Amino acid sequence: MDLETLEDIEDTDNAFEKIELNELKAQIQYAINTLPDYQKEVIILRFYYDLKIREIATITKASVSTVKSRLQQGIKKLERYLADFRGGDNV
């Protein structure tokens, strides 16, 4: 096998990985959009904006325990949705 053939194989593998990653990102975004607004809001603030629970509580005008509950419930729904999407595999 020559170097050019090896590079072509590596490029193909990288292309497939990029496609799979893009599909996963799209599924995650779709799954987030299926959440109720109050759960979607805390998921986005926590994981996209990397805010702390207390900061999210202040922004959403909810108690810390409410934010924790919404976050936990939202994550469980996302896990179930993504497991169903992947054919029942654990996420």
Image (spheres, rainbow, N blue to C red):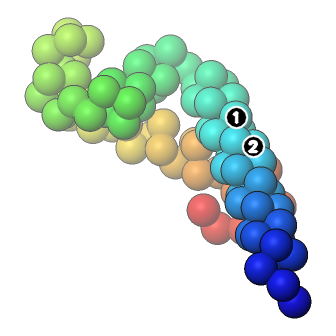
In this view, which residue lies farthest toward the bottom?
1
**Viewer-proximal residue, 20 or 35?**
20
**Is residue 63 in view from this perspective?**
no
Q: Position of residue 38 (x, y in %)?
A: 43, 18
Disc 2 crowd rating (10 Å Cα; few below 14, some 14-19, many 20+) is: few
- Depth check, front residue: 5 or 21: 5
**Is residue 40 placed above or below 31 in the rendered structure?**
above
Count of numbered circles on the image: 2
Residue for badge 2: 23
Measure the C-alpha gap from mark 1 to mark 2. Answer: 5 Å
Q: Which residue lies under the disc numbered 1?
A: 26
Kindly indicate whether the residue at mark 2 contacts the one at mark 1 (C-beta within 8 angstroms). Answer: yes
In-front residue for pair 14/22: 14
Residue 43, by quadrant, is top left
Horizontal and vertical percent position of residue 15: 77, 54
The correct choice, above or below, for 87 with respect to 47 in the image is: below
Q: Which residue does the image show at 60% across and 62% down from the upper left?
A: 91
Q: Can residue 34 be seen in this view?
A: yes
Question: Considering only vertical position in the picture, is 1 above or below 63?
Answer: below
Amino acid type, callout 1: Ala
Residue shown at the point (38%, 30%) measured from the top left: 48
Label annotation for residue 49: none
Query: Judging from the image, what secondary structure is the residue with disc 1 in?
Result: helix
Q: Mark 2: which secondary structure?
A: helix
